[in-house]
Amino acid sequence: MNKFLKILVWPIMMVPPVYLAMVWDKLPQQVALHFDLKGNADRFGSKNELLTTVIILTVMNILVYLILTNIYRIDPKKYAAENKERLQRLGVGIVVFMSALLCMILYSSSHGNISFNTGLVLSAVGLLFAFIGNYLPNLKPNYFAGLRLPWTLENADNWKKTHALAGKLWFAGGLLLAVTCLFMPPVAAFILFTAVMIIITLIPCVYSYQLYKKQKNINPVN
């Protein structure tokens, strides 16, 4: 991965805490901390609780990035090291998404808004899935990332074909969500989001099992 990108990812992680420090004095004593499906605040708390939330999510962001960029070191699969660059790029994408989501929450809090744009959040998640889908076909078999089913892990051809299909579905499904969720009512957008997530996850799993059964019939165990 580009060295500049490796360096840049750390300031991106720190954007939410820095932003919070900049708007701290503008925050009301009570801020929205949880929202329902329609984006309306259904739980409030002190701004100190918001600070705790930002710290926890920032730490989680860092941990996810460190895990994704280092799991190849402990993966017993023969070609796991080939995933290094791909997993690092996935890590950067997740860091950008999490930091942007935190900044959105802080922006709403600092401006006194008590509603949240559910469609915008689901649309952003859709873009994240499309981003992940773009990398799925290139992932080599490993025990930590991808569709880690028993039959994909034991057969490289099954892994390759399953992730080729999953990559197309995740990319297309993510783009569909990114576009449609922006213009749908919140509840409808959430229903569509759930349905698409089930479809793009279930279809590759069923397809992978069918490949496994077909291969088993061709080469039966004596």
Image: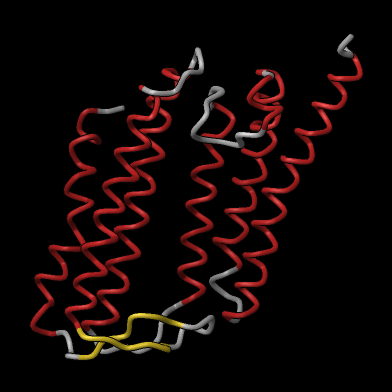
Occupied quadrant, residue 4 = top left
**In the figure, 101 relative to 174: above or below?**
below
Q: Residue drawn at (34%, 37%), measured in percent from left and top?
A: 67
The percent coordinates of residue 62 (x first, y second) are: 26, 47
Q: In this view, does 85 lie to the left or right of 66?
A: right
Colour scheme shown: secondary structure
Q: Residue drawn at (42%, 89%), measured in percent from left and top?
A: 42
Q: Residue drawn at (51%, 66%), measured in percent from left and top?
A: 122
Q: As drawn, which residue projects farthest toward the front? A: 222
**In the figure, 36 relative to 11: above or below?**
below
Quarter the N terminus occupies:
top left
Q: Residue drawn at (30%, 66%), measured in percent from left and top?
A: 102
**In the figure, 61 relative to 158: above or below?**
below
The percent coordinates of residue 85 (x first, y second) are: 38, 26
The percent coordinates of residue 47 (x first, y second) are: 19, 82
Occupied quadrant, residue 137 = top right
Q: Observer-nearest residue: 149 or 109?
A: 149
The percent coordinates of residue 210 (x first, y second) are: 84, 32
Q: Observer-nearest residue: 7 or 29?
A: 29
Q: Is residue 42 left or right of residue 157?
A: left
Q: Is residue 79 left or right of residue 105?
A: right
